Amino acid sequence: MTKYLVLLAGSEGEWENADPADRERWHRAHVTFGREVGAAILGGEALDGTDTATTLRRRGGSVELTDGPYAETAEYLGGFYLLEAADLDQVVKWCALLPEIYSIEIRPCIQIEGMTD
């Protein structure tokens, strides 16, 4: 089994500016996703807006903090899921259940020796 990080990107403010019927439909899609995927969901969260982000950079032994995201983009990272699946095809099938408002990026996770048990 492989772990996959599913990144949910969208237009900032789209959720907040949507009408209640759209928000309800999108919420139901997440509920359906959760029921279908079940125990294969190892974690996941919705993320606050980019105006709450802090970026940390290490330079020559010092730590620099900057308000805002590490990169300015048209889309912002609105949430993520960490899934465990036999293959990418299964993850793609599951992700097709998520709301259409997202651009979804799927990345397999790499296990780094010595990082975890």
Image: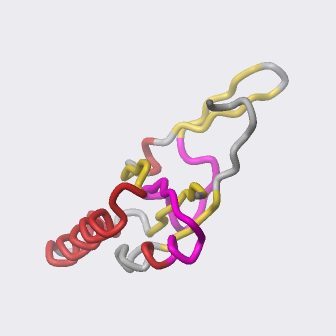
Q: Is residue 26 left or right of residue 112?
A: left
Q: Residue at x 43, y 56 (%)?
A: 79
Side (left or right) of 48 relative to 115: left
109 and 53: which one is in front? 109
Q: Which residue is at the front of the view, 79 or 5?
A: 5
Q: Is residue 16 left or right of residue 106?
A: left
| Quarter of the picture holding the C terminus | top right
Does residue 82 show up magenta in the picture?
Answer: yes
- Is 116 magenta? The answer is no
| Residue at horizontal 52 percent and vertical 63 percent from the top | 85
25 sits left or right of 47 in the view: left
Please name the residue shown 49% across and 42% down the image: 53
Q: Residue 20: x percent and y percent?
A: 15, 72
Q: State whether residue 73 is above or below residue 45.
A: below
Camera-side residue of 59 and 84: 84
| Residue 3 in which image quadrant | bottom right
Residue 100 coordinates in the image, percent (x, y)? 38, 80
Tell me residue 58's x, y (percent): 74, 29
Coordinates of residue 90 in the picture (x, y in percent): 51, 74
Image quadrant in which the N terminus is located: bottom right
Q: Is residue 86 above or below residue 117?
A: below
- Stretch of the chain drawn in magenta: 68-92
Which residue is pictured at 42% across the width and 79% down the height?
96
Question: Residue lying furthest right in this view?
Answer: 60
